[in-house]
């Protein structure tokens, strides 16, 4: 699964790795997401806002594609700007790459 989107919105899609075909799950209702990560322990998909926007963490419904805000992401109380490349550690820790322009 991945999100696709340019401009003001993104959509959750699945990609067939054998054919490259894409199937739409649904609109996330968010600006473009810069990273997705799936938590096996909780069966939850997470997304993070794309670079250049306020950093925000979302949960994503895998049936509808709709994203719900968990909240803004801060580093020591400050907005880090756009984050991308969301990953989950084996212990459930969440990691993201800070975008520096």
Image: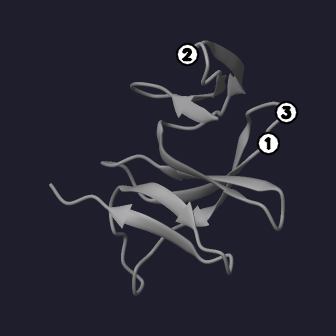
Mark before the other along the chain sequence, 2 or 1:
2
Percent coordinates x, y for residue 39 in the rendering: 73, 62
- List the residue tagged with mark 1: 61
- List the residue tagged with mark 2: 20
* C-alpha separation, residue under disc 2 versus residue under disc 1: 23 Å
Foreground disc of the pair 2, 1: 2
Q: Tell me the residue at 39%/26% (across/down).
A: 7
* Element marked by disc 3: loop
Mark before the other along the chain sequence, 3 or 2:
2
In-image side of 7 versus 64 (left or right) = left
Question: Would you say the residues marked 2 and 1 are in contact, meaning their CB atoms lie under 8 Å apart?
Answer: no
Q: Count every numbered label the image shows and give the total.
A: 3
Label 1 crowd bin: few (<14), some (14–19), many (20+), radius 10 Å: some
* 97 shown above or below 45: below
Q: Tell me the residue at 61%/19% (across/down).
A: 18
In-image side of 69 versus 76 (left or right) = right
- List the residue tagged with mark 3: 63
Q: Tell me the residue at 34%/69% (across/down).
A: 80
**Residue extending furthest bottom?**
76
Percent coordinates x, y for residue 67 in the rendering: 69, 43
Question: Would you say the residues marked 3 and 1 are in contact, meaning their CB atoms lie under 8 Å apart?
Answer: yes
Q: Which numbered tag is attached to residue 23?
A: none
Q: Nearer the viewer, residue 61 or 85?
A: 85
* Element marked by disc 2: loop
* C-alpha separation, residue under disc 3 versus residue under disc 1: 6 Å
């Amino acid at each position: 699964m991945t999100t696709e989107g340019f401009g003001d919105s993104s959509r959750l899609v699945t990609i067939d790795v054998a054919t490259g075909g894409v199937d739409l799950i649904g609109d996330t209702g968010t600006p473009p997401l810069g990273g997705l990560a799936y938590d096996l322990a909780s069966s939850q998909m997470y997304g993070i806002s794309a670079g250049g926007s306020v950093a925000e963490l979302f949960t994503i419904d895998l049936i509808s594609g709709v994203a719900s805000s968990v909240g803004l992401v801060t580093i020591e109380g400050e907005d880090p700007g756009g984050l991308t490349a969301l990953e989950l550690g084996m212990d459930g820790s969440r990691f993201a790459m800070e975008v520096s322009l």
